Image: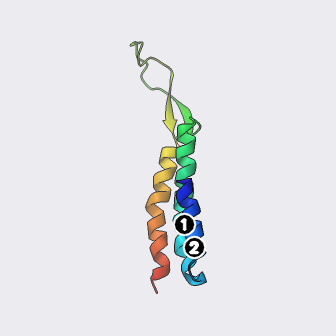
Amino acid sequence: MITSTIAFMGLALTKPRQHRIFHYITAMITMVASIAYFSMASNLGWTGIAVEFIRDDPEVRGFYREIFYVRLVLPVCHYKAPITNLLPQIH
């Protein structure tokens, strides 16, 4: 993903100034995705949530479960960004 970000930023330099916004928005999408994937891979984007029902089974026993909040941030950016990418085309 970070390679795609660098590629989109490099491709933006080959376009006229008024068309670069499309490359910049796409580079922003891939940069947010690369940060989210990195934080999930390095086990950083999670928080502990107290469980409602405590179980006795040793495989699922515990007082907290982990929730990856990065997985919630990523779709928000990915779903709104293509719409943002289309907005400059509307006159």
Quarter location, residue 24: bottom right
The residue drawn where x is 45% and y is 75% is 86
Residue flagged by tag 1: what amino acid is it? Phe
Residue 12 image label:
2
Q: Residues within 10 Å of mark 1 (few under 14, many from 20)?
A: many
The residue drawn where x is 54% and y is 71% is 23
Q: Residues within 10 Å of mark 2 (few under 14, many from 20)?
A: some
Q: Is residue 38 left or right of residue 75?
A: right
Look at the picture and state if 77 lies above or below 48: below
Residue 33 image label:
none
Name the colouring of the figure: rainbow
Q: Residue 62 location, x and y as percent?
A: 48, 19
Q: Residue 60 location, x and y as percent?
A: 41, 19
**Nearer to us in this view, 56 or 86:** 86
- Secondary structure found at label 1: helix
Query: Do tag 1 and tag 2 residues touch (Cβ < 8 Å)?
Result: yes
Look at the picture and state if 1 lies above or below 41: below
Residue located farthest toward the left when viewing the structure as drawn: 57
**Nearer to us in this view, 21 or 8:** 8
Q: Is residue 58 left or right of residue 29?
A: left
The residue drawn where x is 55% and y is 63% is 7
Residue flagged by tag 2: what amino acid is it? Ala
Look at the picture and state if 38 lies above or below 47: below
**Disc 1 designates what residue?**
8
**Nearer to us in this view, 67 or 43:** 43
